[in-house]
Image (cartoon, coloured by chain):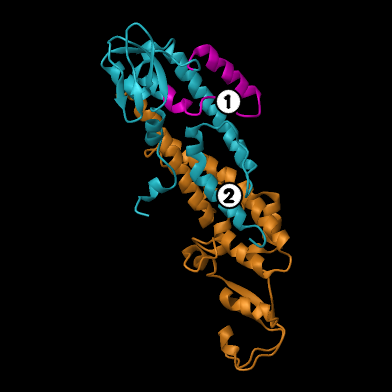
Amino acid sequence: MSLPPSLRASVTPPELELIACQDLVEIIPLISMEKTAFISGAYGPLRPPHRAKIPIWMAVNLKQKKKCHIVAPVWLTVEYLQDKLVQETTQAEFTKLPFRFAEISRVLLDVAADDLQNADKLRTLLKDLREARQAKARKGLEGLEHSTLGLSNLSAMEINEIRPFFIQATAVLGHLRPGA
Amino acid sequence: MDEDYFSIDAILAENQKVGCRFKVDIADMGHLGGGGERDITRSSTLQLPIWLVYTVVLSDWADMIIPPAFGSKVRNALKAEPCSVRLSSLVGAGGLWYGFGKTIMELLDKKDEMSEMLTNTFRKRLVEVIDQAQHFAALGPAGGVGPSGDSAQSFREGLDATERELFALAQEGSKRMKRWYEESEKGRR
């Protein structure tokens, strides 16, 4: 393969972020715009003060030009995350969170912190969640087998982080079986 | 770690000699043992390279002696505490203990026991390997010294080549995550 070794094992976090930015988010536009066709589809029309759903990359762009307010997704609130954190620390399984919550929350907290309520608290909660989940992924490692791995509700970023060595480790385990 | 003809790892894993006790007399082959004798005599023991062991054992000319790297002493030590055994010193620098073990396993009649030992050892050590890899990734480029004491350092030095590779993969992955989180914290937008 022609890719450098560091890119062969898995995609990079910035690439995942790019993919996550295709997801839709609600905004309150401050400018009006006709319905516009993009490669991924047609978005708009934007009519302040009516809400509209557009891709995150577009919302980020508008936000930076101060042409919209981003409405926080339902899961990006202090109450919701606090709830999830409690579940995460009391239950054995991973709690269900949006598949790309790590990327989206990061992007939104970066550009639209002023649109989110209590952004600092959100940051700490997300960090706590991440650490709790990491501890669980580590536990999953102990039960690693050559054929299956049961870690449901893992998010894109977390899968990507453990992918390279999980693949390698399962390959080794498969290899160590008699007659393999 | 695979049987691919072109796999460098497989070649390295077989770069070991195994003791064999001959059951028959073989004339004019004494030079294989590197000694001065002309013939190989019955019940003499020779150190043979693995590629030759296959033929000799499968043709029932000799019995393989389990190499000390997988002998009862190592076996018991692994049973007691897998993380405190230095696998690399069992098979030499850059050695592939698991690969070598796999090769030996294929030559045994009772494969299950050997497989179980290898698998259990790998599994128990893996967690420690990944933990340390993530710890080192978190230290960043400046903190090169491992603060976690002698046992951790001796564990790292005792990693076999397969585990080293995993260590590097895990470390690289954690580093990338850390970079991404920090980059966006600095406000690249």
* Number of residues whose C-alpha sits closer than 10 Å to that of mark 2, classed few (under 14), some (14–19) or many (20 or more): some
Q: Residue A152, position in %: x, y?
A: 60, 33
Q: Residue B38, located in which quarter of the rendered image?
A: bottom right
Region rendered in magenta: A76-105
Quadrant of the rendering where the N terminus of chain B is positioned: bottom right
Colour of chain B as rendered: orange
Q: Nearer the viewer, mark 1 or mark 2?
A: 1
Going 34% across and 5% down the picture, which residue do you hit?
A49
Q: Which residue is mark 1?
A: A96
State which tag comes first along the sequence, 1 or 2.
1
Q: Amino acid at mark 1?
A: Lys
- Tell me, yes or no, whether the highlighted magenta stretch contains residue A102: yes
Q: Residue B99, position in %: x, y?
A: 57, 62
Residue A49 visible in the displayed image: yes
Vertical comparison of B136 with B11: above or below: above
Residue B188 visible in the displayed image: no
Colour of chain A as rendered: cyan
Q: Which residue is mark 2?
A: A170
